[in-house]
Image: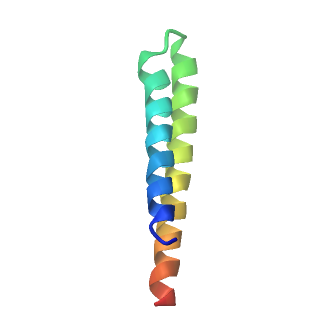
């Protein structure tokens, strides 16, 4: 059961990167639309990294 979480998290992270950077770089909208999309992407990415770090710290403290 332990290897399921990292694999699932990596898949979700790759999906966020794929669907977050793509619209930011190649969107045909105005620059403000791209910046808003990019800001949301950065916020979501930072949140996911913090969750990952938090779970890694919890795992190390349990051992």
User: Which residue is at the front of the view, 58 or 29?
Assistant: 58
Q: Is residue 8 above or below residue 36?
A: below
Question: Residue shown at 55%/45% (left/top)?
Answer: 43
Question: Residue shown at 49%/87% (left/top)?
Answer: 61
Q: Is residue 39 above or below residue 47?
A: above
Q: Is residue 3 above or below residue 37?
A: below
Q: Quadrant of residue 7?
A: bottom left
Residue 62, horizontal then vertical, whole percent: 51, 88
Label total for image:
0
Indicate how the structure is coloured in the image. Answer: rainbow
Q: Residue furthest front?
A: 1
Q: Is residue 28 above or below residue 36?
A: above
Residue 50, horizontal then vertical, whole percent: 51, 61
Question: Residue shown at 44%/38% (left/top)?
Answer: 17
Residue 27, horizontal then vertical, whole percent: 49, 15
Q: Quadrant of residue 60?
A: bottom left
Residue 40, horizontal then vertical, whole percent: 58, 37
User: Which residue is at the front of the view, 59 or 28?
Assistant: 59
Question: Residue shown at 49%/22% (left/top)?
Answer: 23
User: Which residue is at the front of the view, 16 or 32?
Assistant: 16
């Amino acid at each position: 059961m332990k290897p399921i979480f990292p694999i699932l998290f990596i898949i979700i992270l790759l999906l966020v990167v794929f669907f977050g950077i793509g619209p930011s770089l190649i969107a045909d909208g105005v620059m403000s639309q791209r910046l808003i999309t990019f800001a949301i992407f950065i916020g979501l990415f930072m949140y996911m990294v913090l969750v990952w770090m938090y779970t890694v710290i919890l795992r190390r403290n349990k051992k």
